[in-house]
Each structure stands twice: as structure tokens, then as C-alpha cells.
Image (cartoon, rainbow, N blue to C red):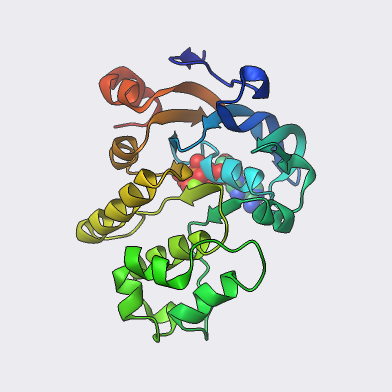
Amino acid sequence: MTVTETQPNTPLEAGAETYFACTDLHAYYGESYIVQGVGFSVRKSEIVALLGRNGAGKTSTLRTIARAGQPELKSGEIFLDGDAIHRMSAFQASRAGIGLVPEDRRIIAGLTVEENLQLAQIAEPKGWPLERLYEHFPRLAERRRQEGVTLSGGEQQMLAVARALARDVKLLLLDEPYEGLAPVIVQEIERILHEIKSLGLTTIIVEQNAIAALNLADRAIILDMGNVVFDGTAQAVLDNAELRQEYLAI
Ligand SMILES: Nc1ncnc2c1ncn2[C@@H]1O[C@H](COP(=O)(O)OP(=O)(O)OP(=O)(O)O)[C@@H](O)[C@H]1O
Ligand SMILES: [Mg+2]
């Protein structure tokens, strides 16, 4: 059963408010049918927490949206700011403004922090200039000459987020940005994400630390077995112990 708080799975015809929408996504890893009809929409400047238990399909959904090779999208539509992302390659989707920050962060070895950021700006469309990135990520400014892969886990996460912002990102997709980080570092990244939120960047955040994600997010979408089982406000999830127990085990 789908629990509905606000309009669920609102397709594009919902009107000008909808900035991002995916409808009825079906995606496979080889023969494995994993994303099984996911659909939801995101308004401009909204932060949506995409939650669910281990294996619910959160990472697969983000990868499908970013048009990563796997899982393979077999049917469904993805629109961002009027562009048909479902017809694009990963490269084209990135150029259209999809900014995926994967769980493993993918900092490039052999390059300094600054070179990692510069590499993101080698092609148009560019996002924030370096000075602006360093303003929001002072730790990266301090370590700009250090090789990226030698940063701490938290600093690498900051670099991964900064690198996404170095592109002209319209939809930021964060896959477990707090994973494996000490609470004090989580707080620092939270502070940065709140800053980014105040600047109005549209974001989807996947996080095991559901409470932290819900505190940041406006809305929440809960996945279970590759499909959406809840679409509503973040507050509604915080207020609903039964729902959290059933789908998030918290
Ligand atoms: N490369 C792959 N090949 C085959 N199956 C995969 C692959 N990656 C993920 N899966 C399967 O797809 C399902 C959803 O996985 P996914 O990683 O999207 O879940 P998740 O919600 O991100 O979980 P977690 O909270 O553990 O990160 C799982 O059953 C997983 O085993
Ligand atoms: Mg995952």
C-alpha cells in the first residue's frame, strides 16, 4: 500500500512547480529486476530524503536517474527542467545538470584537491568558481595542494560534493554522504548541506542516518523492494513511529 501525504508521483502535468519528475522507472542489473516502477517528483529548491532499508533500491534509483550504465533503464521517463533525461547517456545527463555524488566518492588519484575541482570544470557548463567553493568548504581551501585521495573520509566527502557544485548542477544526488564518518564530521557536512539548501539547490539525499536526512529534508520518499511506499513530508515521517519502524527500522 502506498501511504500518501502530499500529491504522490505527480507527473509533469502537475504544472510549473514540478522541476524534476520520474515516472514508472523499471531498471535491471542483467536479469535482476531491481527498480520496479519508481515514480516521484521534486519541486525546485526542495530537498527530498530517499529512504528505505538496506537493499530497498535507493542507490539503484539514484544510478538510474543519473543514467549510469547499470542498472539499465528499460522503461519509464525522467524529466529535469524540461529535459528528457531518460533519452540521455550518463555524460549527457551530467551536462543537463544531474550531479551524482556516489557512495564511494571517486576522488581521482594523483590529483590535488584543486586539480580534482579543476577537472570538473574542464568542460561547460561550469558551476561555482573555485573561490566560491573554497568559501563554503574552508577545509578544502586549506588542503588545496594536497593529493585528494590522502584526505580524510569526511574531507573526501566534502571534495565530492564540491566537485558536483563545480559543475552547473540542477539536481544534486547524494548517496549516503555521512556514511562512515565521525559525528563531528557529519555535523560539518550537515552544516554545508544546510548552506547549500539555503542557496536553493534541488537535492535528493539517500542516507542510512534517516533522522539526519529528515532534519535536512522538506519531503521524504520511502522505497521498499524497488518501489515507492511513502511520499510525503519529512515531518510526517518523523511523527510516524509505525512507519519508521516498518520501513526504516528506527
Ligand atoms: N550490480 C548489481 N547487480 C545485481 N544486483 C544488484 C547490483 N547492485 C545492487 N543490486 C541489488 O539491487 C537491490 C537494491 O540494491 P541497492 O544498492 O539499490 O539498495 P540500497 O537501498 O541502496 O541499499 P543500501 O542501503 O544497502 O545501500 C539489492 O537487492 C541488491 O542486491
Ligand atoms: Mg545504497
Q: Position of residue 162 (x, y in %)?
A: 44, 64
In the image, 41 versus 198, the foreground residue is 198
At 64% from the left and 43% from the top, the residue drawn is 65
Vertical position of residue 52 compared to residue 91: above or below:
above
Q: Position of residue 178 (x, y in %)?
A: 34, 54
Q: Residue furthest left?
A: 184
Count of number-bearing discs: 0
In the rendered image, which quarter is residue 152 located in?
Answer: bottom left
215 horizontally vs 125: left or right: left
In the image, 246 versus 67, the foreground residue is 67
Vertical position of residue 72 compared to residue 155: above or below:
above
In the rendered image, which quarter is residue 185 located in?
Answer: bottom left
Q: Position of residue 4 (x, y in %)?
A: 47, 14
In the rendered image, which quarter is residue 61 located in?
Answer: top right
At 24% from the left and 60% from the top, the residue drawn is 182
At 58% from the left and 21% from the top, the residue drawn is 9
For the C terminus, the image quarter is: top left
Residue 226 shows in this picture: no
Residue 64 shows in this picture: yes
At 35% from the left and 28% from the top, the residue drawn is 234
Vertical position of residue 141 compared to residue 229: above or below:
below
Q: Position of residue 137 (x, y in %)?
A: 34, 66
54 horizontally vs 92: left or right: left
